[in-house]
Image: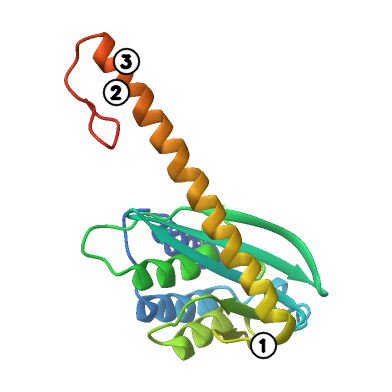
Amino acid sequence: MSGKDDQVLTQLISRMELPARIWSLKKLHVFATKFRRCDASPKNNSFPIPATTSTLFGVAFDAGMACVHVLFIRQGKVLGSRSYFPKVPGGTELSEVVETFVGQFYLQGSQMRTLPGEILLDFNLSDKTLLADSLSELAGRKINVQTKPRGDRARYLKLARTNAATALTSKLSQQSTVHQRLTALASVLKLPEVEADGVL
């Protein structure tokens, strides 16, 4: 890439790092198209990744908080996993937040994450085809997106869903404990009642 293309690419990626911004699937598709035009370097076309590489997204939601548990499967084995807690702005549908999270998951940071051969989701999308096309455009190869897998894939997805629920329960419990401690401290110090978010 030329210096100018590199600058444009950096600006495009930096836009995805704004945490308060909600990106629709259409914006993701436009971004993917621009990214592929700028980044025509061989590193993105070196070798295809087999469909046996999968990333699964399990979702749990309770008390205004969401958890997305990401499970990485490579050659039929669990390579690793991690839980994320995206913010759910007031008046925003959970499905919109999760769809946005999936797009940003592969675009955040200074370098893109390696896209798998397939992505399995624990929820329905408003436009699954658009997401698949956008990610395929970024990867330079076809990315399969499924919402109703069967067999082993379904069992792995159930695991991701269970892990999301467990992580969310733990997070809510931690917040509740912190709130109780702050309330007790406020009582001892004779301070105003502590709000649920921990602010006096």
Name the residue at 57% across, 84% down. 145
**What residue is disc 1 on?**
150
Quadrant of the rendered structure where residue 178 is?
top left
CA distance separating discs 3 and 2: 5 Å
Q: CA distance from mark 3 to mark 1?
A: 51 Å
Decide which of tag 1 and tag 2 comes sooner along the chain: 1
- Residue 200 in picture, x, y percent from top left: 21, 25
15 vs 76, nearest the viewer:
76
> Horizontal placement of 199 versus 28: left or right?
left
Left or right? Give the position of 196 relative to 84.
left
What residue sits right under mark 3 in the picture?
185
Q: Which percent across, then down, holds residue 24?
A: 34, 74
For the residues labelled 1 and 2, the Cα–Cα distance comes to 48 Å
Q: Is 157 placed above or below 18 here?
A: below
**Which kind of residue does numbered mark 3 sit on?**
Leu
The kind of secondary structure element at disc 1 is: loop
Given residues 12 and 190, the one toward you in this image is 190
- In-image side of 199 versus 153 (left or right): left
CB contact under 8 Å: marks 3 and 2:
yes
Q: Secondary structure at mark 2?
A: helix
Q: Quadrant of residue 114?
A: bottom right
Q: Position of residue 11 (x, y in %)?
A: 42, 60
Say above or below: 72 vs 185. Answer: below
